[in-house]
Amino acid sequence: MLRVGDLDRSLLFYTDVMGMKLLRRKDYPSGRFTLAFVGYGEEHDTTVLELTHNWDKNHYQLGEGYGHIALGVEDIKSTCSIIAARGGRVVREPGPMKHGTTMIAFVEDPDGYKIELIQASPKNSLT
């Protein structure tokens, strides 16, 4: 996930310059942010990039725009259980995201980087 200061400018870059497709976009008014997912193929077949636009911030210093890695998973509760059983650290148990209904969880790698797990929907790899 990358935080972007101007979502329209970023979408033009990733679609027109990089040749990706805008796969979906959703506004979260209560959280004052928009998520846009871009990629070279459908979400259930390929890796996609999540662009997050926080409405009240239009610029990030290089490096502070990085958010976290996000992975779509088939069964978020089972995935978290497996990760924990293997010695991984689940830092946010599965549950709905703060400003929506999508089920998410977070795990932390050995260096402290966050990895978001997103419950896959039947239609998309990421919801």
Image (cartoon, rainbow, N blue to C red):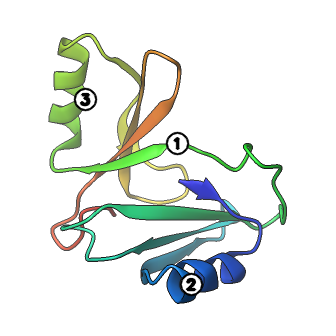
Q: Residue at x 23, y 23 (%)?
A: 83
Return the x and y of residue 91 as percentages of the image width and height: 44, 23
Tag 2: residue type? Val
- Residue type, mark 3 in image: Cys
Q: Position of residue 84 (x, y in %)?
A: 25, 17
Position above or below: 22 against 111: below
Label at residue 80: 3
**Neighbour tally class for label 3: few under 14, some 14-19, many 20 plus, Cα within 10 Å:** many
Residue under label 2: 17
Graded by Cα atoms within 10 Å as few (under 14), some (14 to 19) or many (20 or more), the crowding at tag 2 reads few
The relative height of residue 20 versus residue 102 in the rendered view (above or below) is below
Gap between marks 3 and 1 measured at Cα:
17 Å
Going 84% across and 66% down the picture, which residue do you hit? 58
Q: Disc number at residue 68? A: 1
Q: Earlier in the sequence, mark 2 or mark 3?
A: 2
Instruction: Kindly give the residue lying farthest to the front in the view shown.
Output: 17
Of the residues tagged 2 and 3, which is closer to the observer? 2
| Furthest residue toward top | 87
Disc 1 to disc 2, C-alpha distance: 24 Å
Element at badge 3?
helix
Q: Secondary structure at mark 1?
A: loop
Give the amino acid type for the residue marked by disc 1 in the picture: His
Considering the numbered disc 2 on the image, is that residue within a helix, a strand or a loop? helix
- Residue 105 percent coordinates (x, y): 38, 38
Q: Residue at x 76, y 68 (%)?
A: 55
Label 2 vs label 3: CA separation?
37 Å
Closest to the observer, 108 or 33? 108
